[in-house]
C-alpha cells in the first residue's frame, strides 16, 4: 500500500512538472512566469461558510480573474463565459458536486453597478442557477469548493469545424446546456422576439456574422480566433444555399449596420433581422471600445440583444457562419436539429487566445 501511494505521488509530481515546463514552450519567459503565478493564486480551494446543505458539496464556479496582474489571457464575452461555466459544470457533474455560478464576487465583462431583474449576479441576468441552490445559500454552506479560475479545456468545443458537425459532440454539450436553463424573464423575452421576428410558416436560413475582431479589415484581431469571410463572399454562399436547401428567407444575426446594409441590398424582402442596437456605419472595423455598443450604460442591453439573436439562430431550419462563441451557442442549443449546417473555415488569426 505504501509503495502504491509513493508511485501515485511520483506520477502526480511528474505531471505537474510537465505542465510547468510546458508553459515555457507556449509563452515568453515573462508570460510563463505570470501564468504559473496566476494558476497557483487562483487554484481550487476548500471552504466552510456555515451549516447549510450538510451532506452535499457545493461547487462555486468563480469567473476568470481577468484583472489579475498575472492574467495573460483575453477578456471573454457573454457566451465565451457561458461555455467556461459549462466546462466547470461538467467537472462538478463528474465529482457529484452541486454547481453554483458566482459572477457577483468574481465579476465578468457585463457586470453592472445596479441590479438587473432583481439580481446583482450577472449569471442570473439571463440564466437560472444550474444546481437549484442560490448564491446566498452557497455561502452559508458547510462543505464548499471554490473552483479554480481557469477553463477545463478537456470540455471545450474549440474552433475545430469537425466538432460542430459531430452529432455526438453537439449532443454532449446540448445535454450539458440543458442544466443551464434561461431564466423566466429570458424565456419570455426570447418567445416575444421569435413572435416579432419570424414570419409564420417560413423555412429560415440563419446566418451569423461577427465583424468586430473577426474581420481581416478590423483594427484589432482576436488572437487565435477564426477569420470571418468577406461580406461579399458570404452573401454568395448564402444565395447558393438559399436555393439548394429550399429555404424561404434569411435571418441575419450581426453586430454591425454594415452587414445589414449589404444583406438588404442582396436579399431585399427575403431578409429578416432582429431589431437591436448595432455598430453604426463607418465604425464596424474600429476597436470594440470605440463603439457605442460597448459604451458605459449599454453593456447589459448589448449582452441581452446578443444572447437573444443567438437564441433566434438556434431555432432556424439551417445555419451558416464562421465559428464564434455565439455561433457555438446556437449550434449547441439547437442540439443537432438543423437540417443543414455549414461552418465556414477561412483559417485563424495568429497568436494564442
Image (cartoon, rainbow, N blue to C red):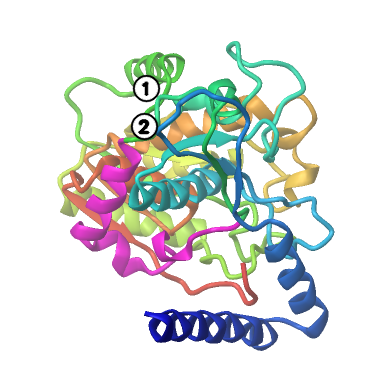
Residue 275 visible to an observer of this rendering: no
Q: CA distance from mark 2 to mark 1?
A: 9 Å
User: Going by the image, does 141 lie left or right of 108?
Assistant: left
Name which of mark 2 and mark 1 comes first in the sequence. 1
Q: Residue at x 51, y 50 (%)?
A: 84
- The kind of secondary structure element at disc 1 is helix
Other-residue count near label 2 (Cα within 10 Å), few / some / many at <14 / 14–19 / ≥20: many
Do callouts 2 and 1 mark residues in contact (Cβ within 8 Å)?
yes
Q: Residue at x 55, y 23 (%)?
A: 125
Q: Nearer the viewer, mark 2 or mark 1?
A: 2
* Residue wearing tag 1: 197
- Give the prevailing secondary structure in the magenta stretch: helix
Residue 318 visible to an observer of this rendering: yes
Q: Residue at x 41, y 65 (%)?
A: 154
Residue 95 vs residue 180, the one in the foreground:
95
Tag of residue 312 = 2
Other-residue count near label 1 (Cα within 10 Å), few / some / many at <14 / 14–19 / ≥20: some
In the rendered image, the vertical position of residue 299 relative to residue 63, given as above or below: above
Magenta stretch bounds: 150-178
Amino acid at each position: 500500500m505504501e509503495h502504491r501511494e509513493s508511485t501515485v505521488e511520483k506520477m502526480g509530481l511528474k505531471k505537474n512538472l510537465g505542465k510547468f515546463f510546458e508553459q515555457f514552450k507556449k509563452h515568453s519567459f515573462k508570460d510563463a512566469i505570470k501564468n504559473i503565478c496566476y494558476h497557483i493564486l487562483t487554484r481550487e480551494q476548500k471552504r466552510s461558510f456555515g451549516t447549510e446543505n450538510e451532506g452535499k458539496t457545493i461547487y462555486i464556479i468563480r469567473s476568470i480573474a481577468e484583472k489579475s496582474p498575472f492574467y495573460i489571457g483575453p477578456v471573454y464575452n457573454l457566451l465565451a463565459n457561458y461555455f467556461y461555466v459549462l466546462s466547470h459544470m461538467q467537472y462538478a457533474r463528474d465529482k457529484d458536486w452541486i454547481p453554483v455560478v458566482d459572477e457577483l464576487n468574481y465579476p465578468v465583462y457585463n457586470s453592472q453597478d445596479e441590479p438587473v431583474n432583481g439580481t446583482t449576479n450577472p449569471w442570473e441576468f439571463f440564466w437560472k442557477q444550474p444546481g437549484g441552490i442560490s448564491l446566498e445559500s452557497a455561502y452559508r454552506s458547510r462543505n464548499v469548493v471554490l473552483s479554480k479560475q481557469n477553463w477545463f479545456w478537456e470540455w471545450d468545443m474549440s474552433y475545430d469545424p469537425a466538432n460542430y458537425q459531430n452529432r455526438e459532440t453537439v449532443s454532449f454539450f446540448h445535454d450539458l446546456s440543458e442544466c443551464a436553463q434561461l431564466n423566466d424573464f429570458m424565456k419570455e423575452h426570447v418567445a416575444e422576439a421569435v413572435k416579432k421576428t419570424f414570419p409564420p410558416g417560413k423555412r429560415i436560413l440563419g446566418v451569423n456574422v461577427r465583424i468586430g475582431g473577426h474581420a481581416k479589415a478590423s483594427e484589432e484581431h482576436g488572437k487565435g480566433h477564426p477569420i470571418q469571410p468577406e461580406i461579399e463572399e458570404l452573401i454568395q454562399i448564402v444565395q447558393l444555399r438559399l436555393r439548394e436547401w429550399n429555404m424561404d428567407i434569411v435571418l441575419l444575426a450581426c453586430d454591425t449596420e454594415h452587414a445589414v446594409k449589404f444583406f438588404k441590398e442582396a436579399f431585399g424582402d427575403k431578409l429578416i433581422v432582429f431589431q437591436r442596437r448595432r455598430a453604426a456605419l463607418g465604425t464596424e472595423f474600429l476597436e470594440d471600445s470605440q463603439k457605442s455598443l460597448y459604451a458605459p450604460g449599454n453593456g447589459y442591453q448589448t449582452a441581452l440583444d446578443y444572447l437573444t439573436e443567438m437564441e433566434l439562430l438556434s431555432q432556424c431550419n439551417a445555419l451558416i457562419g464562421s465559428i464564434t462563441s455565439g455561433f457555438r451557442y446556437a449550434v449547441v442549443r439547437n442540439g443537432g436539429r438543423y437540417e443543414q449546417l455549414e461552418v465556414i473555415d477561412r483559417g485563424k488569426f495568429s497568436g494564442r487566445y
